[in-house]
Amino acid sequence: MAKVNKQTPEQQSQAISDAKKKTQETASQLINFSLKYLKDQEKFPCFAHERDYYLVLIGRIKDLCSSKKMEFIANRSAALRMHPIKWDETSEKDGFGIPGEEQLVDTPYQFNVTSNEHGRVHGFFILNTFYIVWIDRTHQLYPKKD
């Protein structure tokens, strides 16, 4: 049996307006970072670096926290090199390997910690939170082609 919508046209219009407003508010909020899905693997070690590396990494993340999601995603500066990950061009063809990844990850992204010296960070967004999965200091996800 079909579900009957008991909302008046005014209530439906208000619900649509509220949904649009929520979407706009979310887009205008600053990004956050989470380590909930951080993976420490041999290929992508996150605890094997010296102190100075973490100071640079945390400094980059702190600076990025003053960005809005759309600014962050659209940033094409050489220093940040933010872009979606194309799994078929990487060493990890099956993605991050997170349980339920198909439902969690719409688009995987990576960004540089610095121009080249400090590698990259790989992860994904849920709303305005960027979940860091791998810290890739030695550029292992996109290995150099011979």
Image (cartoon, rainbow, N blue to C red):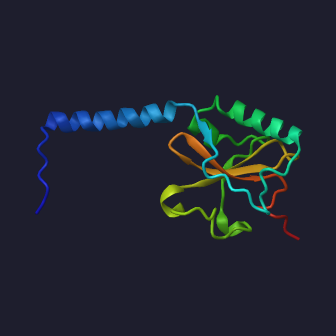
Q: How many marks?
A: 0
Q: Which residue appears at 37% of the width and 32% of the height?
A: 21
Relative depth, front residue between 85 and 38: 38
Quadrant where the N terminus sits is bottom left
**Residue 121 on image: x %, y %:** 73, 49
**Residue 23 on image: x %, y %:** 41, 37
Instruction: State the image quarter where residue 97 is shown.
Output: bottom right
Q: Which residue appears at 60% of the width and 44% of the height?
A: 130
Instruction: State the image quarter where residue 52 is shown.
Output: top right
Quadrant where the C terminus sits is bottom right
Relative depth, front residue between 144 and 52: 52
**Residue 127 on image: x %, y %:** 50, 43
Q: Which residue appears at 61% of the width and 36% of the height?
A: 71
Instruction: State the image quarter where residue 40 is shown.
Output: bottom right
Q: Is residue 59 above or below residue 145?
A: above
Residue ranking furthest to the top: 66
**Residue 42 on image: x %, y %:** 79, 63
Q: Which residue appears at 68% of the width and 34% of the height?
A: 64
Relative depth, front residue between 57 and 49: 49
Left or right of 72 in this view: 10: left
